[in-house]
């Protein structure tokens, strides 16, 4: 959330990477916090309807936070790695195509320039210039045909840490209520109250950052959390309530 | 996983959308399945070390699957919606810039064309043609300056269903072991065996699809699952073991 104003203010620096870095970081925080606030909350709420001990809710909640945090962090890391590897695979293919079927590739460059809105005459000049150097040609195809930017390999570990931390922070908020109350039912009341407030605040700011109506966004987040918790409560009571 | 060969084979159809659709779908399945196989598995494993009843593990596991499935599905939906809204916000800004600061925007078009590798003379012709029509100009800036494709609004609900289903399918696999065994300890042994095999198979095919070394990919997935489960087991035993 270091550059939350990027999408709503007229920035001084219009360099493309600027847009991307901040929305990637923001997206990671939003992903981690959304799930962290909802899943451990919903799990704890569900168990509150089925077990008699707050200790059990806390045990399950902490196990979930640890598991979710590792899985989501690593998920973020692997997704970032996959993006890097996908880029490299496509690059290898474009290099082969430029070498083996240059006429087809040249026609594709011409088609792209026509899509941009260039006239036949300007295209003739441009195609000749763009395909003069094979590496430049491949770079052009990667960026403008496939829409792939060369990904930053440092993004993957950064994403892992961001998502993972956001998930853990989000998850400890609803669980904290069970630490200071004596029964799961009391814990649930406080947990629901705290978490719904956090979801409203989180939804509000998240929407403001992306230029959406903030009140609608706040309500949306709260509804997601409430729905997940109600569903978990229902299933836990149905399976485990009799025990 | 309907078009798994897109990134490894030389496709007949090189249209950009083709690449994107299949990797978006694939990425959704991979996200859902990765977390579904690991988080409920790790939670169940963690609780197995801290509680005496398989019924409790099943109750918590099902509550987690329902909660995670709703939260992840809705997370996927909201992420897709955000992409659509982000595109619209950037488009509004580009339209304003083209109207209010056309000289700066014209210089940006020239800079982009220079980056592509066009000569000053070709650029002069191209800039004039690209900026003749304001809507075409905005479209050019969106796609080539910001690298934003107009997102498909139908992608968001599709992502929601795919991620949610993949998570539920993934989560029921490790949990199934506790249905057919009588103690959490027995459940854990079978759950770990089944899940590790699934993670190896999933990792193998996932890596093959993205053109990565499949055996390394299989081992990586299994290590993620084992780490998350071991961490959850450790924390659950530490907090809940005495109860």
Image (cartoon, coloured by chain):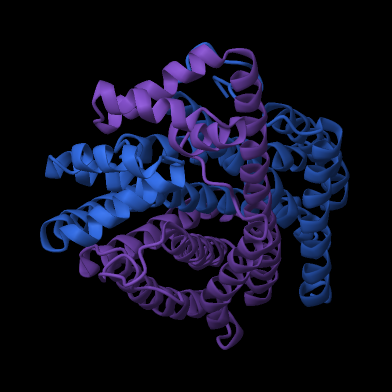
Chain colours: A blue, B purple
Residue sitting at the far front? A121
In the rendered image, the quadrant that contains the N terminus of chain A is top right
Q: Is residue B115 visible in the rendered structure shown here?
A: yes
Q: Position of residue B191 (x, y in %)?
A: 47, 76
Count of numbered tags: 0
Q: Which residue is drawn at 34% across and 65% down?
A: B222
* Between B163 and A68, the one nearer to me in the picture: B163
Position of B122 relative to A232 (above/below): above
* Between A81 and B177, the one nearer to me in the picture: A81
Q: Which residue is drawn at 45% across and 60% down?
A: B229
The quarter holding residue A189 reads top right
Q: Is residue A77 visible in the rendered structure shown here?
A: no
Answer with left or right where residue B189 lies relative to residue B154: left
* Between B46 and B83, the one nearer to me in the picture: B83
Answer with left or right where residue B169 lies relative to residue A141: right
Answer with left or right where residue A201 lies relative to residue B44: right
Answer with left or right where residue A181 lies relative to residue B162: right
The quarter holding residue A60 reads bottom right
Residue sitting at the far bottom? B180
Q: Which residue is drawn at 52% across and 78% down?
A: B173
Q: Where is residue B41 in the image (x, y as percent from the top left)?
A: 51, 67
Q: Which residue is drawn at 79% across and 75% down?
A: A243
Q: Where is residue B242 in the image (x, y as percent from the top left)?
A: 59, 54
Position of A10 relative to A24 (above/below): above
Position of A18 relative to A154 (above/below): above
Q: Position of residue B118 (x, y in %)?
A: 26, 30
């Amino acid at each position: 959330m270091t550059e939350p104003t990027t999408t709503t203010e007229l920035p001084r620096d219009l360099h493309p990477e600027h847009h991307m870095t901040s929305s990637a970081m923001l997206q990671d925080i939003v992903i981690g916090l959304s799930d962290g606030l909802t899943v451990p909350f919903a799990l704890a709420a569900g168990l509150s309807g089925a077990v008699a001990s707050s200790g059990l809710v806390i045990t399950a909640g902490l196990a979930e936070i640890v598991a979710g945090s590792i899985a989501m962090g690593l998920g973020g890391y692997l997704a970032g790695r996959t993006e890097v590897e996908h880029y490299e695979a496509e690059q290898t293919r474009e290099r082969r195509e430029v070498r083996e079927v240059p006429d087809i590739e040249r026609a594709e460059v011409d088609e792209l320039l026509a899509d941009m809105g260039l006239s036949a005459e300007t295209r003739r000049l441009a195609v000749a210039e763009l395909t003069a150097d094979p590496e430049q040609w491949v770079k052009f195809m990667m960026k403008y045909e496939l829409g792939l930017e060369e990904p930053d390999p440092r993004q993957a570990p950064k994403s892992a840490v961001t998502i993972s931390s956001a998930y853990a922070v989000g998850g400890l908020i609803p669980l904290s209520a069970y630490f200071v109350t004596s029964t799961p039912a009391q814990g649930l009341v406080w947990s629901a109250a705290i978490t719904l407030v956090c979801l409203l605040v989180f939804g509000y700011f998240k929407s403001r950052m992306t230029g959406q109506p903030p009140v609608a966004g706040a309500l949306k987040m709260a509804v997601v959390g409430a729905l997940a918790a109600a569903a978990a409560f229902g299933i836990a009571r149905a399976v485990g309530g009799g025990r």
